[in-house]
Image: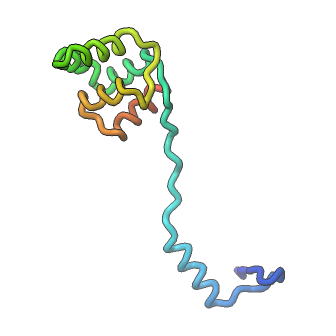
Amino acid sequence: MTRHTMEDGVIREMTPDEIAEQDARQAAAPPVVEPTAQVPQQISVGQGREALYNAGLFAKVQPAIDAIEDPDTKWRVQNAWDYRVTWERQSPFVAMMAGILSLDDEQTNELFITAATL
């Protein structure tokens, strides 16, 4: 099979050296990475709680909240856990809960991605 290239607006056959060079560049190119799922910036509390339950983390939340020593922080986290309608990915509540549950950013993102499908 012949390969062609365009040079100065003229299409011509590639030389064997040009073909070898093109093959080498393609072999060295990084693999195509499928795009990852978009992390939703907001999920409903119902979605979040179900995702936590499915991940085996739901039962750890209330004891973790109960263990917060600062009364103001404890009240704010408990209020968000009990009464928020949505959870924002970048909110202080989500950051605090991720820390309490020992979740890194990638794990938290995965929970949000999963929750959005529920």
For the residue pair 103 and 75, the one nearer the viewer reads as 75
Counting every numbered tag in the picture gives 0
Q: Quadrant of residue 88?
A: top left
**On the picture, is 28 further left or further right than 21?**
left
Residue at image position (21%, 14%) is 71
**On the picture, is 8 further left or further right than 117?**
right
Locate residue 106, reporting x and y percent.
36, 41
Where, quadrant-wise, is the N terminus in this rendering? bottom right
Locate residue 14, reporting x and y percent.
71, 86
**On the picture, is 53 further left or further right than 22?**
left
Locate residue 8, reporting x and y percent.
80, 83
Looking at the image, is 25 positioned above or below residue 15? above
For the residue pair 30 and 99, the one nearer the viewer reads as 99
Looking at the image, is 107 positioned above or below residue 2? above
Locate residue 37, reporting x and y percent.
50, 40
Looking at the image, is 4 positioned above or below residue 71? below
For the residue pair 3 and 9, the one nearer the viewer reads as 9
For the residue pair 81 and 111, the one nearer the viewer reads as 81
Residue at image position (35%, 39%) is 105
Q: Quadrant of residue 76?
A: top left
Residue furthest out toward the top:
83
Residue at image position (49%, 45%) is 36
Residue at image position (30%, 26%) is 97
Residue furthest out toward the right:
10
Is the image coloured rainbow, by chain, by secondary structure, or in one colour? Answer: rainbow
